[in-house]
Image (spheres, rainbow, N blue to C red):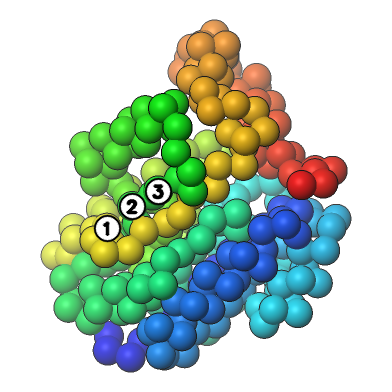
């Protein structure tokens, strides 16, 4: 796929403080790549200036009001004009060589798509432990997440992103991996580039955030494992779908 065209899909819920930063990282990568790159920002229940800032900075803006990140991403994927679709969350950034490396890997014909390594935008001991656990999980399962990339037609054939309420990224990586295996191709991860992962929730709620959540909500997780997911969904809404509401950061 030498000289392939790209669409970068960015889901956003009240991201006026991060959307320009994310778009600029894509623009730098696009300039380094040198090919055609479309940027789509999918606004999800935004009540701030996310859409205005995205349009002002050259992105195409779409809307999806569902409380499902998979559905939000799928809105962008279905509207994409590029041959290869890349997804990245709005508070994160890609490194300069990301699109060029993806184009190279796709051109080999060996890969169905892939993910990207993740690095936090600052360091601390609890973030180090969090990073170690994530890397171990990715290495064991091969379901790399972070930035997702594959041909648009591949995303369509697998039914798009999983619309699970939680762990939709891991489920989607699994779909891509299995689909690739059925086609004699591998699901892989970038080697030279990576996702710069925002620490804003840790900045707000402490670097031990997810360890504390696991301990505090152990009962909720156990009940969810046995089918009662109401409290889990409420927790997910608080931590993800409603996190940016009324934020003034």
Q: In the rendered image, is residue 184 in sight?
A: yes
Residue receiving disc 1: 189
Is residue 22 depicted above or below 247 in this figure?
below
Mark 3 vs mark 1, foreground winner is 3
Which comes sooner in the sequence, label 2 or label 1? 2
User: Of helix, strand and loop, which one carries label 2?
Assistant: loop
* Residues marked 3 and 2 touching at CB (< 8 Å): yes
Percent x, y of residue 150: 36, 69
From the viewer's perspective, tell me whether residue 42 is left or right of residue 129.
right
Gap in angstroms between the C-alphas marked 2 and 1? 7 Å
Q: Nearer the viewer, mark 3 or mark 2?
A: 3
Circle 3 SS class: strand
Q: Judge by depth and name the residue closer to the eye, 161 or 193.
A: 193
Pointer 1 local density, CA inside 10 Å: few below 14, some 14–19, many at least 20:
many
Name the residue located 46 percent from the left edge and 85 percent from the top edge.
31
Label 1 element class: strand
The local crowd at label 3, few if under 14, some if 14 to 19, many if 20 or more residues have their Cα within 10 Å, is: some
Residue that numbered label 3 is attached to: 119
């Amino acid at each position: 796929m030498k000289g392939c065209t790209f669409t970068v899909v960015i889901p956003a819920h009240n991201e006026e403080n991060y959307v320009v930063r994310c778009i600029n990282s894509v623009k730098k990568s696009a300039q380094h790549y040198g090919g055609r790159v479309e940027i789509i920002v999918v606004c999800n229940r935004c009540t701030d200036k996310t859409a205005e800032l995205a349009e002002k900075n050259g992105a195409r803006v779409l809307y999806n009001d569902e409380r499902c990140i998979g559905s939000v991403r799928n809105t962008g994927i279905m509207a994409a004009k590029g041959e290869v679709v890349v997804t990245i969350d709005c508070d994160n950034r890609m490194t300069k060589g990301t699109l060029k490396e993806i184009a190279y890997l796709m051109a080999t014909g060996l890969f169905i798509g892939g993910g990207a390594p993740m690095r936090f935008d600052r360091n601390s001991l609890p973030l180090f432990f969090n990073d170690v656990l994530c890397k171990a999980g990715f290495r064991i399962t091969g379901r790399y997440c972070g930035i997702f990339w594959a041909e648009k037609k591949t995303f369509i054939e697998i039914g798009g992103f999983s619309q699970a309420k939680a762990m939709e990224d891991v489920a989607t990586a699994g779909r891509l991996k299995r689909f690739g295996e059925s086609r004699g191709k591998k699901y892989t991860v970038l080697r030279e580039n990576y996702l710069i992962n925002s620490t804003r929730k840790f900045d707000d709620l402490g670097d031990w955030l997810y360890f504390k959540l696991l301990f505090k909500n152990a009962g909720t997780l156990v009940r969810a494992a046995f089918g009662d997911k109401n409290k889990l969904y409420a927790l997910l809404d608080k931590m993800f779908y409603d996190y940016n509401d009324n934020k003034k950061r």
